[in-house]
Image (tube, rainbow, N blue to C red):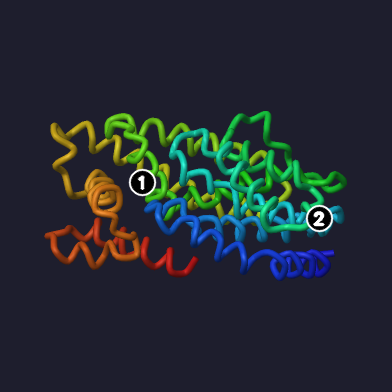
Amino acid sequence: MKQDVDSRIAEAEDQWLEKLKLFLENLFKDTFLPSHDHTHHLRTWHAAKEILLEIAEFNVLLSADFIEAVLLAALFHDTGIIETRGISHGEKGKKIYLEYIAENCQKEPAMHSKIASAIEMHDQKSENLFIPFHWDKIPDLLTVVSIADDMDAMGTIGIYRYAEIYLHRSIPMKSLGVVLLENVATRYNNFSKASSLIPSLLKKTKPKYQEIISFYDNYNQQLLTETDPLRVFYGHIGIINYIRNFSVVGKIHPLDFPKALDNFEVGKYVLDFFNKLEEQLKMD
């Protein structure tokens, strides 16, 4: 069955991937938000493929139409961020998807309405929206796309992605860590619930979850000792302030953060973090 799913994934990619990569690159060319641009959408699709192949080990119900739906929902889920960086971006992304299909396709995808709904709802992290994967039931499209998105919110990349979008949303520094930790814990709990039959995926994702939790726990602890955190450029707060100054204010791409740091006296912890981020972004 896994071989069949591999073949169906390849067919879906042959039909959609290259033209949608070009569409996404053009869509984001005038929006500087590297944490949620076309590269994030491609990582989400790669995570979704990994989930599909794991599900195929115990479930024979992954049709070509369902795989196509996952690909399309993954590649459109955050497109609405070009219009709003708030929580309503799913609704805007749904609109972009519907317009793309209407303008570029003679025939709608088989699961058209469910794809649109998954795009709209992907950022709603209420526990009752997540349906655990099962061996004799068709997987839930929203669940697959949402947890693929959540996988890109963990680890070093997740530390950066959360910081950038939360800073754009003007969340105060003293609240940022608290709000973030609550959100990422909800994401991981939903991920764990949905993926109980995929222990290998849980094993792979747990260290990344622990990394982001540890970082922002330490960030919150450092806040207790700093009277003017906006002027701190060392430790965990320093990393967040460099993300603010480079990405949010200076519009420097995260791949160029290490080079930009050459102009500053930077401690090893900060430099090591951004070198690691650059390495992982290039790898992914």
- Judged from the image, the secondary structure of the residue bearing numbered disc 1 is helix
User: Residue 277, located in which quarter of the rendered image?
Assistant: bottom left
Q: Residue at x 43, y 39 (%)?
A: 85
Residue identifier under label 2? 65
Residue 37 at x, y percent in the picture: 47, 55
- Residue at position x 43%, y 35% from top? 181
Q: Is residue 273 visible?
A: yes
**Residue under label 1:** 164
Could you tell me the amino acid type at mark 1? Glu
Question: Where 56 falls versus 214 (above or below)?
Answer: below
- The one of 192 and 97 positioned closer to us in this rendering: 97
Label 2 residue SS: helix
Give the distance between the C-alpha atoms of the residues marked 1 and 2, in whole angstroms.
Answer: 35 Å
On screen, residue 84 versus residue 163, left or right, reads: right
Contact flag, marks 1 and 2 (Cβ < 8 Å): no
User: Foreground: 134 or 139?
Assistant: 139
Closest to the observer, 30 or 179 = 30
User: Measuring 75% from the left and 42% from the top, which residue is drawn there?
Assistant: 113
Q: Residue at x 52, y 38 (%)?
A: 89
Count of numbered circles on the image = 2
Label whose residue precedes the other's in the sequence (1 or 2)? 2
Q: Amino acid at mark 2?
A: Asp
